[in-house]
Amino acid sequence: MSKNKTYKIILSGGGTGGHIYPAIAIANELKLRFPNAEFLFVGAKDRMEMEKVPQAGYKIKGLWITGIQRKLTLKNLIFPFKLINSLWNARKIVKQFKPDVAIGTGGFASGPLLQVAASKGIPSLIQEQNSYPGITNKLLSKKVQKICVAYNDLERFFSKDKIIKTGNPVRQDLLDIHSKRTAAIKHFNLVEDKKTLLVLGGSLGAKAINELLKNELDFLQTQQVQIIWQTGKLYYDDYKINGDIKHVQVHQFINNMDYAYAAADFIISRAGAGSVSELCIVGKPVVFVPSPYVAEDHQTKNAKAIVDVNAALMIAQEDLEVDFKNKFSQLVASKEKQQQLSENIRKLALVNATKEIVDEVEKLLKQ
């Protein structure tokens, strides 16, 4: 297969970092293999991909599309018009660009684009990050040739002969975090022999996790931990602390995530698919607090898949007040439990996901 061939590759995924990041990772790996390839992303107008994709160096076109709201709203009444408009524009984009392959990583925009590409006979692949697929990928699964997944037991939703278990693309700088611990402690200005708790609420932040931390700071001080707390950009102003609480650092966003993970002894996190995949590679004891606000409650299902094999703890958001102190103090007190969770979650890591997904894309290009 010629490295110099000028393939045309179209990718679509977005709405949240969890869909955008895998699409960019796949494009980067394809670019390494085919430096002359031409790439085009398709996203949803006014969502974060319109900013993040150009920052990563790729062209993007936006469709006028949103998801269906779960309650009756005005947005739902205009949904059919948005869908027709998006299918019409997706058709125009595909006709002009003439892609050799189409790749979807989930999110609203990937629906119309992959639907059009597959119906025109363009070899197509979707990547499903979650343990419970969203509606877009369930509908598309009938049309595409390959479905790359990160969890077992997805035969319930997809045709068995299309499924390849690859895992989710993750940041490559996480593969070697254990060697970065000393540098990480210095970077965050931490106390060397004190345990560190890292708190993450996803790229936008999680109000419930931020509230929990604010309410339990006194308790956490009794647990002798220092805290790296990422509030997310929506909440930073509400929770930033004046320098009077020792051993607590509040960040709106953490750029050096590899260092944050390297410094951590315990992690509290949401359970989006990307976060879960990263945490398997990181291999530290995790307490998942899944977001109850996502479609199909897929974060709870993602976390449960890990908890069921004794590889993490989970506290439902509505149980935080009752359960948190008890569960967290037991974890801090038990070296044995910490070790068990670390070993078990590491066994679930799929470190070559991006390469394996791109291997499947290559096979489609050969056809």
Image: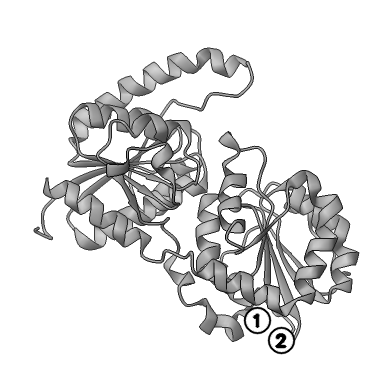
Residue at 69% across, 46% down: 234
Display colour scheme: one colour
Residue at 75% across, 46% down: 317
Q: Nearer the viewer, residue 37 or 173?
A: 173
Q: Quadrant of the C terminus?
A: top left
Q: Does residue 7 appear anywhere in the picture?
A: no
- Image: 84 above or below 335: above
Per the image, the residue denoted by label 2 is 192
On the image, which quarter does residue 269 sit in? bottom right
From the viewer's perspective, tell me whether residue 131 is left or right of residue 308: left
Residue at 35% across, 27% down: 112
Residue 134, numbered label = none
Residue at 61% across, 38% down: 297
Q: Nearer the viewer, residue 157 or 259?
A: 157
Residue type of the residue flagged with mark 2? Glu
Q: How many marks?
A: 2
Other-residue count near label 2 (Cα within 10 Å), few / some / many at <14 / 14–19 / ≥20: few
- Residue 117, image x, y percentages: 25, 31
CA distance separating discs 2 and 1: 7 Å
Which of the marked residues, 2 or 1, is nearer the chain's N terminus? 1
- Residue 247, image x, y percentages: 80, 74
Image marks 2 and 1: residues in contact by CB distance under 8 Å: yes
- Image: 112 above or below 48: above
Say which element carries label 2.
Answer: loop
- Image: 298 above or below 241: above
Q: Nearer the viewer, residue 31 or 272?
A: 272
Per the image, the residue denoted by label 1 is 185
Residue type of the residue flagged with mark 1? Ile
Say which element carries label 1.
Answer: helix
